[in-house]
Image (cartoon, rainbow, N blue to C red):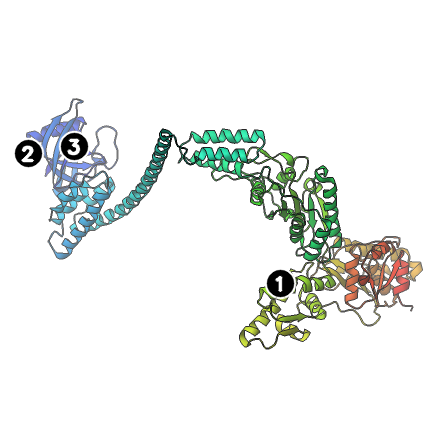
Amino acid sequence: MLYPVIPVRDMVIFPSVIAPLFVSRPMSIRVLELVRQNEGLVFVTSESSRAEGEPGPDNLRRVGTVCKLLQNMRIPDGSVKTILEGQYRAKALDFKISGDHLEADVIAVPSAGTERTADLEALRRCVYSEFEKYVKLSPKIPDEVAAAVADITDADVFADVSASHSLLSFAEKQSILETADVKTRLHKLLAFFMRDNEMLAIERDIEDKVRAEMDKGQRQYYLHEKLKVIEEELGEDGPMSDVEEMKQKAKDAGMPEETEAKAMKEISRFSRMAPMSPEATVARTYIEWLTELPWKKSSEDHLDLGDARKILEEDHYGLEEVKERILEFLAVRKLAADNMRAQVICFVGPPGVGKTSLGKSIARTMGRKFVNMSLGGLRDEAEIRGHRRTYVGALPGRIIQKIKQAGTNNPVLLMDEIDKIGTDFRGDPAAALLEVLDPEQNCSFTDNFLEVSFDLSKVMFITTANSTATIPRPLLDRMEMIYLPGYVTEEKVKIAKRHLIPRILREHGLSGIDVSFSDSVLRTIISSYTLEAGVRGLDRQISKVARKLATDIAENGVKNKKYSVAKSNLAGMLGAPKLHATRVPKEDSLGTAIGLAWTEAGGDVILIESAVMNGGGHVSYTGNLGDIMQESAQTALAYLRSNADAYGLTKFPWQKRDIHIHVPEGAVPKDGPSAGITLALSLCSTLTGRRIDVTYAMTGEMTLHGEVLPIGGLREKLLAAKRLGIRKLIIPEDNRADVEELKPWVTNGMELHYVKKITQVFDLALKKK
């Protein structure tokens, strides 16, 4: 059947629904006039795509609704308001232009599955339940709509009417219109309503929370203002207001004049802000930081050197040079008082030697507050200087935070791991520390958050580092380096007995039991299970023994009040030894010399081997030798070749022999010049065929002309030889003064030979042919 067409945009009219329509297109207005003169039926369909001007057949959807025209009303602007009633679904088979309007050949699309069954009725009720919730949650749909839809029992009509009154999108409504099967149509509506109900519930919950917060803030503000007016009328002094309290704190804080003026200005600005505004929160935080910093609060220094020496001896064993330097600092501080120029101390040493605990001891001796901060991995400059207040969540830098935490303006501030500061796009924290650690500048340190200067000159800064190699030179120049050497075995034994074992037994519930470790047991643990400069590994191994004892006591009870840890029990408690001592030759050897080396874990004994074989005059090095050690070997070889007459090597076929130099334990890197005389002895023995007296160990750097130069780490090297039972040592003459400074127990039982020339080394350690 042919019906005139009224195209609509983004709108769907459903069957059984009366809907108003505003028509402004000339073609559609002519259709309304034509329909009013005839039977009053028109085909209403939506545009599938927007067209300029009047839409054509290609711009219209095929499925629409045949509607009956109920009323037309002219509007002054020339458009027409019409009331349409949807009659039935229809599908356009073809569109054509008839005169001055558009017509469509349509057929009715009857609804399928309209038989009233229990399943269909149950589905309709489910949809109505969700639709009722939908109406209650949506503020744009009147509550009367739900009551009107409730009276519709026909599932077909119910689906169309409820879809028409919903706020579904145009695409979703068109999908409902194009669905002829009633059950499928209801399923779609159910899914749409359930989805929208969930979203509307979340929106309602958010709105309620926001409204409640706003109402609470407005109510508090109203009551607060009302209370102030009542107190003024009664002439009574009520509790101090926030602003008055802030002003009083600012006056009592002892700020400098400029800082106090800025604080008062900020407080005045805060008083004019709405209490719940974000700006007020930022301003309050800033004012609290200003008023709570210890501008004039200092702790009194306790500078009794006798007490200081006692505390340092209680807390640390050994480290005599370090303790003396700390006592010197305290003595100068006592005599010079405020005239003393601020100094920044940097403790440099391997892990576990007590750098951090030394900082705590200094604070304890001086009676100052102690705070520490770790700089390891720090990459953001703002961590030192703070963030600008324009950033959300801005805070002062760590320096100011620690000062506030200490509660005084002269604490001992320890900065750990200063050698592990990083750099990235957020700035260079090491550069920010230049101002903090410079006594000429830190009296007026300005944090980005505070925007006022704070005097850091009274703070005692102590830094720690494992190495100075990665510390920038300008920063290194501002600090006084105090080097902490690693502990040797004898010192570790004393530390274990005095500090570690009592603490570990207490922590493991063994305080009431006498657990004894002999010196030989502790030396075995140190030499066979730990390889370190400090005592952390030793602490872990002793703790492991304590856990074994605690487990045995918990299972079997206390059999006796005294336990003695024996060497024979160590393997069962700690497992097989992890380290093995260097195997020193027992007989005079050819080409194997015993050298002494310094490591972070203390001294060590190394073997240097050499061999000669047929070849093409090449020299090879194995054993993971560094560049300096290889150069020392080349120097020794050059000396022997240049003095071939003295050692009977004039006829040696240098171009037909290969020389191989090896240092065992190839997985361990080795470097340094102090193996020079040991390399020369090994090569001389191999080339001349004279055997080496293995009762000697040696250390010393060698020049190209055979001079022996001094070396470092002498104490550690002597103790390493002593530990392996080597009593005869060859050391440079220039190190004689260093030996005289050593404690007597280090050199007791040792036979020391001082040499100036390599020939003296050969005379002592090379056997005659």
Which mark sits nearer the N-terminus, 3 or 1? 3
Residue 144 quadrant: top left
Which mark sits nearer the N-terminus, 1 or 2? 2
For label 3, the crowd category at 10 Å Cα-Cα, with few meaning under 14, some 14 to 19 and many 20 or more, is: some
- Look at mark 3 in the image and give the residue it sits on: 21
Give percent across and percent down for residue 709.
85, 53
Query: Viewer-nearest of labels 1 and 2?
Result: 1
Residues 234 and 549: in front is 234
Q: Quadrant of the C terminus?
A: bottom right
Residues 337 and 743: in front is 337
Q: Quadrant of the N terminus?
A: top left
Check contact, mark 3 vs mark 1: CB within 8 A: no
The reply to whether residue 99 is visible in this rendering is no
Residues 173 and 759: in front is 759
Give me the residue at 67% from left, 75% from top: 568
Q: Give the residue furthest to the right.
A: 645
In the rendered structure, the answer to whether residue 43 lies left or right of residue 584 reads: left
Q: CA distance from mark 1 to mark 2?
A: 106 Å
Give percent across and percent down for residue 255.
57, 33
Give percent across and percent down for residue 441.
66, 35
- Look at mark 2 in the image and give the residue it sits on: 39
Query: Viewer-nearest of labels 3 and 1?
Result: 1
The amino acid on which the numbered mark 1 sits, given as a three-letter code, is Arg
- Residue 503's disc is 1
Give percent across and percent down for residue 54.
21, 29
The reply to whether residue 64 is visible in this rendering is yes
